[in-house]
Image (cartoon, rainbow, N blue to C red):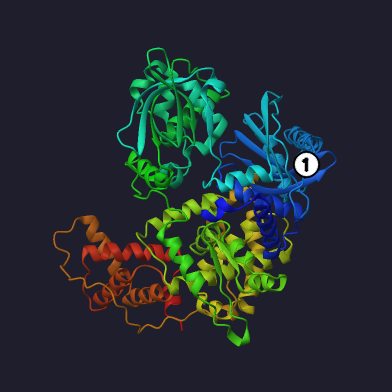
Amino acid sequence: MDQKEKQTLPSFYAEFMEQIEQAKEAGSFGWTDEDFFTSVFLDYLAEVGEAEDPIICPFRDRGLQLNAYVLSDDMESLTIFVSLYNSSGTAQGVARTDIEATLKRAVHLYRRAINDLYKSFERDSGTYEFAITLNKNRETITNVRIIVLTNGIIRQIPFKPLELNGVELHFSIWDMDRLYRCMISGKMRETIEIDFEKSFGQTIPCIESSPSDIYSVYLAILSGDVLAELYDQFGSRLLERNVRSFLQAKGAVNKGIRDTLRNEPDMFLAYNNGISATAEKVEIVRDENGRPSIRKIRDLQIVNGGQTTASIFTAKKDKKNPTDLSKVYVQMKLSVIQSLEVMDEIVPRISAFANTQNKVQIADFSANDPFHRKLEELSRTIWTPGANGAQPLNWFYERARGQYAEELSRETTPARKKQFKETHPLFSKTDIAKYEQSWELLPWEVSEGAQKNFKKFTMHLAQRGNFIPDDSYYKRLIAKAILFRQTEKIVQQQRYGGYRANIVTYTVAWLSYATAQRLDLESIWKEQKISEALAGEIVAVSEFVSRLIMRPPNAANITEWCKKKACWDRIADYNHEVSRALQSELIGLARTDTVVGASISPTGIGAATDDEKALVDKVVAIPAVTWFALSNWAKETNNFEGWQRGVLFSVGQRVGRGLRPTVKQARQAYKVYEEALRKGFKAEQGMSG
């Protein structure tokens, strides 16, 4: 953080431009420099809450421009990003006329898209999907933002909203100065500043208390209209520190909240628990009797009550049946943390304790989590073997943004910088999530986008308890990274058209499933490349994957189809036999391997229920050889914990001797058995080799 505070705008700009070069070197997508600029800029905006998993979709033609977009799951909010980029070595001033011309192209694009723009494109293009989606949902979209991205500097322009077909279009600009100020603030988001007097013509009466010199607490009542307007303006940025917002996917509007808002608005204050919020600073004004009111809040974060807030906003914006919020009021407990030094320690605790109904006991699985710190440590010390005379590599895990650029800046000559890049391949937190989730047969979650997929990965990882990676995990992870990245290159070479990211994750997942995760990751780690047999199989698999995802049922939206488990089910069931060349390379599992596990004393079936007896019958019906094979498969593929593998081996021994396992053994073993089948395990595969 100290490094960031000392960073100047010119050095930040140089770092930003270097990241564009890194993105270009990582792989050619058929993109222009402007597209790579857009991608890097949006990575930053995803971190500051301005863009959740944007879709890069370059298009420019005859007064129309689109670089990327975000469309909310409920099809109500649309954000269009348009870029102004130049390759200058310093941040240049941008003329207002250029900004206005860019915005005009974006407005014209939106106007055409809700009409008949889709007729101009082939169905398998990303631009077609953007246009046809807007056309089909033009009556649903209620909120449109158009954001200009530029690597130049411009004085912020107070654009007025524009109404088009009953929808308000809002405009904003992100230039280098705004992004720089956001990054050096020490927060991974842009600070929210609220002036109630200026925005709403009122202050918020409150009760104040200062229990300690660390924090103060303010109790206040907000009107439903004010809360809805705040959410309309800032959206999910209000919920950045909300544990439940981080860990859970968005669900439908809570029916109880909605019904109260519509049927008993005057009782909402009594029925609803209200919201808990935190802030960095408040400005208090007092009336003639000394009674306090809140005039300004800096860095407001709703840590509990996100569902309430979103529900109030949705009810007000409902096109078919908008709710009158004039009688709706919400109580707010606002905790203001006086010391910035303890902000990141205390606020997550407030969030976690305010959300005690959440079963996942985790405040913030972020860059500071022990998992990521250990992974960073491993990446700085482990080098590849350098097999067959190849140059050893030291993969660089960027736990926090800017670490790689900082290390690169220490190399003093172009030749040394080039050498550093060649010997230190870069990967990030969202990259890890892509690699692991694809390997674990969750391609529909990967298809939801980098940020959403990382949240899902976080949830899955949290279920493993306090898992800390070791050397073995790290090497297997890098092997998965190589598999994923080389799949990207091979898929690109096939020129399937759009949807490369979806084709890649589904191809990797299918290979993981079809081989029961028996691809030789150790060999990939040692060689730092995949075999010719695996490369050939990727070509074959990606071909039918491409066909299947581009033909969704009922002519559905392709991107949305890829986000559904039904898409994976169709692809997983596709009849394709892995080549013999690849089969010969799969890791073999010897039946005689010894598995060390927990010692479980047999207690007999005892007074088991009928369901428990039926479960034990299921387990006994599976041959002992299958249980041994499964135990060995789990060991060799690094699936499941050691004690679980021990249970499998013990069950195999008992079944082989004609004995019945205990109910506890049967329950644990059968759960592993079903999960292994999901991952592609087959008894006959387990006995090969």
Residue, disc 1 = 94
Q: For residue 69, what is the image quadrant?
A: top right
> Does residue 576 appear in this view?
no
Number of marks drawn: 1
Residue found farthest to the bottom: 388
Q: Does 471 sit above or below residue 128?
A: below
Q: For residue 480, what is the image quadrant?
A: bottom right
Residue at image coords 45%, 71%: 473
> Does residue 608 appear in this view?
yes
Q: Does 312 sit above or below residue 10?
A: above
Residue at image coords 33%, 47%: 359
Taking depth in this image into account, of 423 and 487 the one nearest to the observer is 423
Q: Position of residue 330 (x, y in %)?
A: 40, 24
Q: Residues within 10 Å of mark 1 (few under 14, many from 20)?
A: some
Residue found farthest to the top: 288
Taking depth in this image into account, of 91 and 458 the one nearest to the observer is 91
Q: Position of residue 570 (x, y in %)?
A: 56, 56
Q: Does 283 sit above or below residue 583?
A: above
Q: For residue 337, what is the image quadrant?
A: top left
Q: Position of residue 250 (x, y in %)?
A: 48, 40
Horizontal side of residue 177 vs 112, given as left or right:
left
Taking depth in this image into account, of 424 and 631 the one nearest to the observer is 424
Residue type beneath disc 1? Val
* SS at badge 1: loop
Q: Position of residue 285 (x, y in %)?
A: 45, 21
